[in-house]
Image (spheres, grey):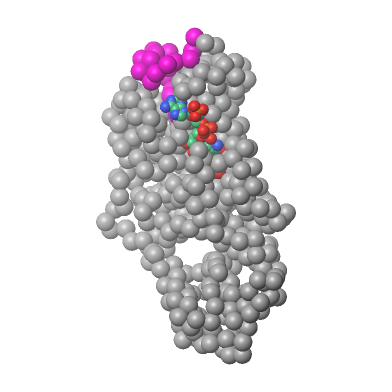
Amino acid sequence: MIKKVGVAILGLGVVGGGTYKTLLEHREFYKRTQGVDVTVEAVLVRNPAKAQALGVPEEIVASNIAEVIANPNVDIVVETIGGCDAAKDYVLAALREGKAVVTANKELICKYWHELERVAKRTSCGLYFEASCVGGVPIIRTLLDGVQGNKVEQMMGIINGTTNYILTKMTVEGADYAETLQEAQRLGYAEADPTNDVEGFDALYKLSILSSMAFHTKVPQTKIFREGISQISGKDIAYGKELGYTLKLLAIGKNTDKGIEVRVHPTFIPKEHPLASVNDAFNAVHLRGDAVGDIMLYGRGAGSLPTASAVVSDVLYAATHSEVKYATFKNTATAESNVKFVSDFESAYYLRLSVDDKPGVLAKISGVFAKCGMSIIQIAQKGQYGNLNKDRVPLVIVTHKTTENICKKAVKEIKSLKIGTIESVIRVEQ
Ligand code: NDP
Ligand code: HSE
């Protein structure tokens, strides 16, 4: 006999709407291939027009969370509201009532995973969040059930669709930053507050979840270095291109002898690097395990149906597995006291300066680099800045690997020379 499973969807926006459509359209397919009859028994919306537009039958539109939780036909609650206000209360209420929860909410899992899991364990419920990281790319399942035989040494990825979309358009078409961000919002890639995307918070939430899972220890968001793309100029993208680099917002996690290193920042990578050709809202994560070696996962990191694919995968998993898995590490709010984190990480650097066009300026700058023990790979004086700043010229410098603190010291000393301004400092992965 086919097992019947009832689902409630909280929030019918980009992801919730895609989930509703996918579950409805594939009902017969899931009966045949998964042996479960999944029906949507309730939806919770703030605006009933959203439900009407999707053709949701009026009788399953709930007016409050209590009604959803009390519905005996609801086995699994899907949270696609976002944020940590109503979403957190509703998820906790569902778990307390013994309902499995599937969520796409990376902010909620990053900040409150420990709290939600405590309740889930108490009521023996599943808490699933594949859609929270890297959209339709099954990275969570890969970490849980694919590479669990490995010690994962590092991961590096493009894990935010909005910023990758913006950077791709700026690189390929020389597009305007603000206009492209609006386009990403229209396409449903961006978060409700796109600051989360462009300032790197979305990638930081995801990296906290992924590196905790990969390294089997809590990596709280406070340990992650973060820098967004809002200050990136088209000039840097163009100069980087001339040097053979492509600019990406990278999330990097390493488990080294010195400790765990976790960071999110705009990064120049060589144009031949496998991540350089990951464009638009596509995402990719490169993992290195001690047994398997290198693995790369690639796919759509945002958008309605790709994300619904991950939500529905969790729904089907919850519907077909009675055994529940929890975190493989002590799931607390903070990092364990014996775990070290590396903040003074190593990197190569690209610097763009706007300097006085006078004899001796270059010598002073290279003197600072020599004093700080920073080795220069390339230095190039570019053409003048149009009609403005006639006495200033752009100077582009690429260094060998050094540490973050040494680079900061050199930047400070160059500023004190009063020979111009430092316009940008961008990390380079070779
Ligand atoms: P949307 O803003 O499109 O959808 C959220 C929906 O929730 C809106 O329709 C909103 O209603 C509704 N809502 C808000 N508060 C309540 C409430 N109290 N009760 C009922 N409904 C409510 O966001 P997304 O679908 O893009 O994102 C949802 C979640 O999925 C977020 O956590 C996001 O980070 C995550 N995610 C998003 C991806 C994407 O590509 N968009 C990809 C992966 C994850 P109203 O219309 O009235 O505002
Ligand atoms: N805003 C997110 C992004 C959605 O652009 O990647 C997917 O998590």
Q: Quadrant of ligand 2?
A: top right
How many numbered discs, if any?
0
- Identified at 39% across, 12% down, the residue is 72
- Identified at 32% across, 58% down, the residue is 339
Q: Relative to 141, does residue 2 appear above or below in the rendering?
A: above
The percent position of residue 330, horizontal first and vertical second, equals: 30, 45
Q: Relative to 76, does residue 265 appear above or below in the rendering?
A: below
Q: Relative to 295, does residue 424 appear above or below in the rendering?
A: below
- Identified at 28% across, 58% down, the residue is 338
What is the span of residues highlighted in magenta in the rendered image?
Answer: 59-79
The percent position of residue 90, horizontal first and vertical second, equals: 37, 27
Furthest-right residue in this view: 173
Residue 416 makes an appearance in the image: yes
Which quarter of the figure has residue 223? bottom left
- Identified at 38% across, 51% down, the residue is 221
Q: Nearer the viewer, residue 340 or 409?
A: 409
Q: Nearer the viewer, residue 107 or 147?
A: 107
Residue 136 makes an appearance in the image: no
Q: Which quadrant is home to the C terminus?
A: bottom right
Residue 66 is a magenta residue: yes
The percent position of residue 62, horizontal first and vertical second, equals: 44, 15
Furthest-top residue in this view: 59
Residue 351 is a magenta residue: no
The percent position of residue 397, horizontal first and vertical second, equals: 59, 76
